[in-house]
Amino acid sequence: MTTPSGTGAPDWDPEQYRRHAGPRLRPLHDLLARIPPLLSPRPRIADLGCGPGGSSLLLAERRPDAEITGYDLSEAMLAEARAHAGPTAGGGRLDFARADIAAWEPEGPYDLIVSNAALQWVEGHRECFPRWVGALRPGGVLAFQVPGNGGAPSHTLLARLRTSPRWRGRLGAGAVPTPVAEPAEYAAALADLGCETDVWETTYVHLLAGEDPVLEWTAGTVLRPVLTALGGDRAARDAFLDEYRGLLREAYPKGPHGTWFPFRRIFAVARRPA
């Protein structure tokens, strides 16, 4: 889940975000599969950028004995996530709290700090790594995945349109995803903190259905700042979406099976030595 901080943060729509829940959660499944066994019999887990709670629920399924807290900045997302709060099947507990990831201060030691598709909204997020790694118990793990598709047409076309003469006065500035690092840069930063690192990238080729599926996808994430900025001007909002829709249809043409949407993701698992 994306969770920007600071001024100009977009309004998030849990229903829109869930329209591609399966493809959005698949990278989290792949990330969790690479996390080494946690050493504590009752692990403490933080889920940074939990969104409507899907990632935290998955963590609870895998470790029903854990004390899990999901953190997010969006009250709309947390309102849905909190419906899942309470005891878990294995004697653990699932809770949710409002927090700005960039300023989050871990309270006490953690066995796992995980973030699924949120750090791209936190400028300078690598500067948070020392604080987060320092909060891990020996053998604890920091694990995250971030979109690495800033060079994809879905993003470059949106950036070009936002800064075009027609729109730059209203949309040229404001909340946008911060450039993420390359895998080797994440690996080096985490190794410098004394961690055993496992860093990789994957490009998922999603097959999307519908008339404008890439527009629907971005409407749940990277397009949110635009929709928020133009939310009070329906005519301008529709005009912008019409322009963006046309560009996306050309970049991602619909084929006989649907629309192919390549999506690069970057993963990192860093374990503090036991």
Image (spheres, rainbow, N blue to C red):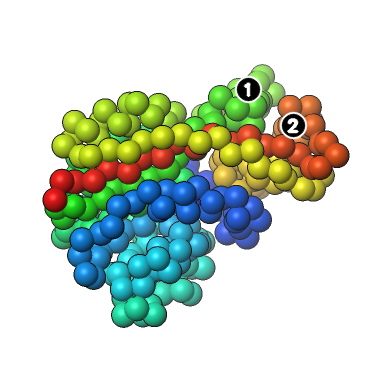
The residue where tag 2 is placed is 252
Q: CA distance from mark 2 to mark 1?
A: 17 Å
Q: Amino acid at mark 1?
A: Arg
Spot occupied by residue 183 in the image (x, y as percentages of width and height):
38, 29
Q: Amino acid at mark 2?
A: Tyr
In the figure, 78 relative to 219: above or below? below
Q: Helix, strand or loop at disc 1?
A: helix
The residue at the point 71 percent across, 43 percent down is 207
Spot occupied by residue 191 in the image (x, y as percentages of width and height):
22, 33
Whether residue 7 can be seen here: no
Spot occupied by residue 216 in the image (x, y as percentages of width and height):
70, 46
The residue at the point 40 percent across, 53 percent down is 32
Q: Helix, strand or loop at disc 2?
A: loop
- Between 266 and 181, the residue placed more toward the observer is 266
The residue where tag 1 is placed is 160
Spot occupied by residue 121 in the image (x, y as percentages of width and height):
43, 40
Mark 2 or 1, nearer chain start: 1
